[in-house]
Image (cartoon, rainbow, N blue to C red):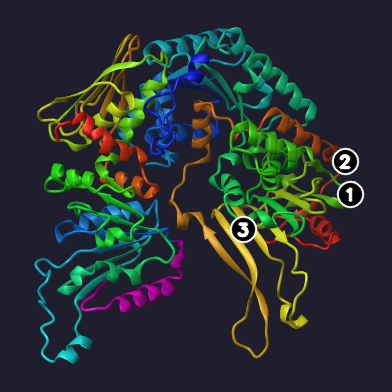
Amino acid sequence: MIIDMPNTRTREISSKIDELHEERGESATGRVLTLLIWTNEDELEHALELANAASREHPCRVIAISPKRGAAGAQTHAEPEDDAAADDETSNLDAQVRFGADAGAGEIIVLHPRGGLVHHPDTLVIPLLVPDAPVVAWWPTEAPSNPSKDLLGAMARSRITDAMRSSNPYRTISDLRRNWSPKNVDMSWTRLTVWRAMLATMLDQPPHLPISTVRVTGPKGFLPMDLLAAWLRLRLNVPVVIEDVPGATAVTGVYLTRADGVLSLERPDADEGVAVISMPGQSPQTISVPARTLEECLSEELRRMYPDEIYAEVITRGWDLIHPND
Amino acid sequence: MSETTTWVNPLRDPRDLRLPRIAGPCSIVIFGVTGDLSRKKLLPAIYDLANRGLLPPSFGLTGFARRDWTEDHFKDFVRENVMAHCRTPFKESTWKQLAAGIRFVQGTFEDKSAFERLSNTVAELDRDRGTRGNHAFYMSVPPRDFPIVARQLADCGLSRSTEGAWRRVIIEKPFGHDLASANDLNRVVSEVFDPSSVFRIDHYLGKETVQNIMALRFANAMYEPIWNANYVDHVQITMAEDIGVAGRAGYYDGIGAARDVIQNHLLQLLALTAMEEPVSFAASDLIAEKTKVLSAVRIPRDLAAHTARGQYAAGWQGSHEVVGYLDEKGIDPQSTTETYAAIRLDVDTRRWAGVPFYLRTGKRLGKRVTEIAVVFKRAPHLPFESTATRELGKNAIVIRVQPDEGVTMRFGSKVPGGSSMEVRDVSMDFSYGRSFTESSPEAYERLILDVLLGEPPLFPTTREVELSWEILDPIEEFWSTLGQPQPYRSGTWGPEEADEMLARDGRHWRMP
């Protein structure tokens, strides 16, 4: 169910939601968090789809804020003819409320602020948050240069960015590194969880010999590869070489050298999603490792809301170790 | 072994909670692979684990059965059952990967050469799939077959592991039908396998709601202070089934409800509800507390007054007509087996002195439900007119184990309006489905993974099994002198005897 609410106010949205809950015999107290999404109109539907899917694991209230294109700053709609009357009858806000089949396991509120309202997203959403539940902020593409100083970011328990999908991934990550805070996390890191788990599992197997060198291969300029290299550099404390594989779309291989040979984890084609694990003295084994979807990444971030200290070490210390000249 | 205890994987960090626990290289051999449990639960659970990326690339699955099948027949059989019952979406890529490690060994349990073939298959998996000598044997077979399978495994050398590798055996309830048979069974298994490699599956303990009992009790401030005889009046633990004996007639007749359910599931739920706080959630600490509380359980002196049994008679189960137990196919028409059992137990500790625990289970009851209800004493003083609290019951915390997993609290609230004060019971509700995932993992996924990882906290130990038989044996003995259990109409909440049993204590059963 999708309800359009043009020229509306937050109070009207709240009462609409209460009304819908009552009508449907639901209670809003089961929502475990509020997910705030700040995005542009082009990305909006895609982001909502992802949030929808993630809400099946984490029933949440999704509030997406997407300013009207070119509306920032300019009072496009509310041209006051008669000041006093205009204040009462016009609004800087269009909204949409989605329920039921259109909203996963929660409800979705889409806000399109205009004019001066664009600059006050925090007070815009405050009346709509789920009471006494954590707030998570997510920027699906472009991230603020300092999420903790961002008005929405400041009220969030956890701030999720995705530098890889921003227009300039390396500039974005460099901003995020400079303005790092324990509550921030970037999805480039989340994309690595499966690889990291498989590598850790490989090392669980005896013989437990020390690793001497590490090689990571993948496409140049692929942010998760830098983070993976930085993590391995930090944890293993040995030199890590990054090798460019032209045309690849994701990390293609990790090679760990130790006295008895090379342990490797290779996935030449991310779309095919088949990885090969080779260990010294063992026949190579294949395993299905499909590329991680954004939906899985978002679900993982919503599952954990404590500060990720490993990520913190990787983007602060680890990054400098593999990019000493940055 | 010292190497593994001192060596720390540099890629692991206790702060790195994102990394899932993935089983190391290993294989699982299922005896009785064509049975119901295997088809509906085990095979789908293994697939779901693979789909969640929790199984290693070096994984083998071997089926052992009498049927004259080729490996391809068997693969088709696994695929069919996985597709019918898996929880996560069926993906061709996951299936292909899993199927590459599937083997089939045809034979009977008496056939020595079949076990040699099994031994060769397992060795071939070690060689070609890199399972590294780590193998788990799942006994999805009737207990009478345990001794022979265990013996055969020992004879062909499969029960012993090489250095650095493990062999584990998984057995399903029933763990015997009384203390003596449980000890026999235990002797047979422990002759062949090391006690620490024996995993007894009580699938209730794999359920999220059951593990949540510990979170509820020990992670919160508001329950533990009142979780004792000062505040608790009594506890009711119920497991009701709406189905009859169905296809299990052969097993069920002569066993009955108490041995089938109370001995394992309900006494485990009692242990988790009543135990003291473990010093940690490590297996040994948890088991210590469960064992302690089970050893403090006392059965009533007057068994006739404080136990009840029944047998379902014909009736209407909800909307369809059903036959009585004695008319079921495969049941002796003179059978005295109970299909309903209720007992009162006391726990002789300071925490629970004078607080009875009522356990009941039965088939063909009103609906399918499992719950633990902690019922509190009335407020010591009610500053209202007595008419105001006429409809006020006792406060209760109800842990709903299945279905509709969650927790309900019942307490009194003022009825709005009216000229006088009136207090009535209301419910406050927490539901897993609404606050967390829509589909949480099946108990068997969790338990199979725990076996492969070698993590035993959720598996009852030999001592726990012994203690539960010590509790149940005298009751069974008493019942065996009584003759026919009291019949109850199918679709109701059990025999009158059970209601009288609680009425004697001035209480009544909750309607779940």
Among the two numbered marks 2 and 1 on one chain, the one whose residue lies closer to the N terminus: 1
Q: Out of B5 and A317, give the one closest to the viewer.
A: A317
Q: Residue at x 26, y 44 (%)?
A: A187
Left or right: B290, with A216 as reference point: right
Q: Which residue is mark 3?
A: B222
Mark 1 surroundings: few (<14), some (14-19) or many (≥20) residues within 10 A: some
Kind of residue at badge 3: Met
Q: Which mark is residue B272?
A: none
Among the two numbered marks 2 and 3 on one chain, the one whose residue lies closer to the N terminus: 3
Where residue B120 appears, as percent x and y from the top left, is 47, 9
Task: Judge whether residue B503 is colored magenta.
Answer: no
Among the two numbered marks 1 and 3 on one chain, the one whose residue lies closer to the N terminus: 3
Q: CA distance from mark 2 to mark 3?
A: 41 Å
Task: Judge whether residue A14 is colored magenta.
Answer: yes
Magenta part, dominant SS: helix
Q: Which residue is mark 1?
A: B304
Kind of residue at badge 2: Phe
Q: Share a chain, discs 1 and 3? A: yes
Q: Residue at x 42, y 74 (%)?
A: A23
Where residue A163 appears, as percent x and y from the top left, is 19, 46
In this rendering, the answer to whether A101 lies above or below B180 is below
- Name the front one of labels 2 and 3: 3
Q: Which residue is mark 2?
A: B478
Q: Residue at x 33, y 69 (%)?
A: A126
Where residue B283 appears, as percent x and y from the top left, is 60, 32
The answer to whether residue A36 is visible is no
